[in-house]
Amino acid sequence: MNAPDTWLTILLLTLATIITRGTFYLLGHAVRLPPRVQHALRYAPAAALAAIVVPDLVLADGALHLSVFNPKLMAGIGATVFFLVTRHLLYTIIVGMALFTIFRLVF
């Protein structure tokens, strides 16, 4: 891409972002979603996070790798159990990274 194409792309993406996000600020009070849709949208962040994290935990070199020798999967399971017990997010991140480091060095 040459310089004018790059700047045009940046400009168009900026406009698209402003238009799509700005409409919620300008029209947010006028648009009412049904209660069922509002309830369903509460699960969207968790679903998006799971869609990002789970493939990274279970795939290795493009293939499914479900075994105790997968350090990412074992650390993810350990961090999940820790979070379910303590409900403390910062400590969960620390424990997950520590477990990953330990499992990576062991395996």
Image: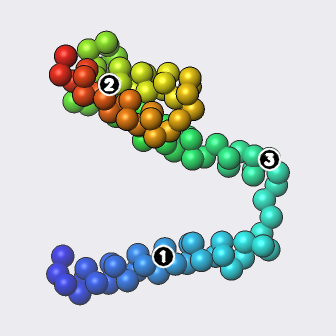
Marked residue nearer the N-terminal end (1 or 3): 1
Asked whether residue 24 is in view, the answer is yes
| Residue at the disc numbered 2 | 99
Mark linked to residue 16: 1
Image quadrant occupied by the C terminus: top left
Is 67 rendered above or below residue 30? above
Is 94 rendered above or below residue 9? above
Q: Residue at x 37, y 83 (%)?
A: 11
Left or right: 15 with respect to 3? Answer: right
Asked whether residue 55 is in view, the answer is no
Res. 64 image quadrant? top left
Marked residue nearer the N-terminal end (2 or 1): 1
Left or right: 43 with respect to 97? Answer: right
Image quadrant occupied by the N terminus: bottom left
- Numbered disc 1: secondary structure: helix
Marked residue nearer the N-terminal end (3 or 2): 3
Left or right: 62 with respect to 79? Answer: left
The amino acid marked with disc number 2 is Leu
Q: Residue at x 17, y 81 (%)?
A: 2
Discs 3/2, front: 2
The amino acid marked with disc number 1 is Ala
Q: Residue at x 38, y 29 (%)?
A: 95
How packed mark 3 is, by other alpha carbons closer than 10 Å (few <14, some 14-19, many 20 or more), is few
Is 12 rendered above or below residue 79? below
| Residue at the disc numbered 3 | 36
Percent across and percent down for residue 21 are: 57, 72
Percent across and percent down for residue 25 are: 66, 75
- Numbered disc 2: secondary structure: helix
Farthest residue, direction bottom: 4
